[in-house]
């Protein structure tokens, strides 16, 4: 004969304290930070800024944030490479990534205006990063 499971309550009545979540922002400009600041401050998130895409992948692997906010610019293919690497890596593929686009950087626009007469390829002629 089976006996019923114990009826003792294993849950504590003490409030559950949730650890602060980490949000990592890559290439965040002042416009997006103004939009995100009230939301992130209200939720009491730990915010980590990574200025350049070149260092973003290693920082994300090291920090293991709960959310990544990644700016993808058409004039900066490194952001797209970071996103690809994150989704190919078993240790980082489950981290949610929010992407947004921003206008091209001012220095890139000035260079484009100077080189108007020169036919430029849409994508720079650089080899892709090795993912393995």
Image (tube, helix red, strand yellow):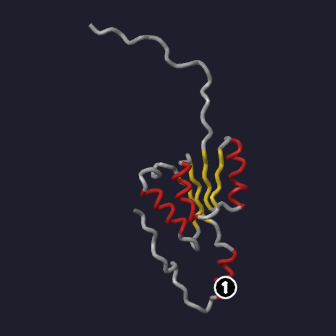
4, above or below 77, in the image: above
Q: Quadrant of residue 16?
A: top right
In the image, what residue occupies the spot 67% across and 88% down? 114
Left or right placement of residue 122 versus residue 112 in this view: left
Q: Position of residue 104 (x, y in %)?
A: 64, 72
The residue that appears at 68% across and 46% down in the rendered structure is 39
For mark 1, give the secondary structure.
helix
Viewer-proximal residue among 123 and 92: 92
Number of disc labels: 1
Q: Within 10 Å of the Cα at label 1, are there few (<14), some (14-19), or many (20+) other Cα atoms?
A: few
Q: Position of residue 83 (x, y in %)?
A: 50, 60
- The residue shown at (51%, 62%) is 82
Point out the residue furthest to the bottom here.
117
Identify the residue under disc 1: 113
Q: 79 or 56, which is in the foreground?
A: 56
Residue 88 sits in which quadrant?
bottom left
x and y percent of residue 8 in the render? 47, 11
Residue 132 percent across, percent down from the top left: 40, 62
The answer to which of 27 and 36 lies nearer the viewer is 27
Name the residue located 52 percent from the left edge and 80 percent from the top edge.
Answer: 122
Q: Is residue 93 shown left or right of residue 107? A: left
């Amino acid at each position: 004969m089976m006996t019923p499971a114990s009826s003792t309550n294993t849950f504590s009545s003490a409030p559950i304290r949730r650890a602060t979540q980490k949000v990592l922002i890559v290439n965040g400009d002042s416009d997006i930070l103004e939009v995100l600041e009230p939301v992130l401050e209200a939720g009491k998130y730990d915010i980590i800024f990574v200025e350049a895409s070149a260092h973003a992948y290693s920082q994300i692997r090291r920090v293991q944030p709960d959310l990544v906010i990644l700016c993808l610019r058409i004039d900066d293919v490194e952001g797209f490479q970071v996103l690809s690497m994150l989704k190919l890596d078993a240790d980082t593929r489950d981290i949610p990534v929010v992407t947004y686009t921003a206008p091209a950087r001012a220095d890139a626009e000035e260079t484009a205006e100077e080189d108007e007469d020169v036919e430029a390829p849409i994508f720079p002629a650089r080899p892709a990063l090795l993912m393995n």
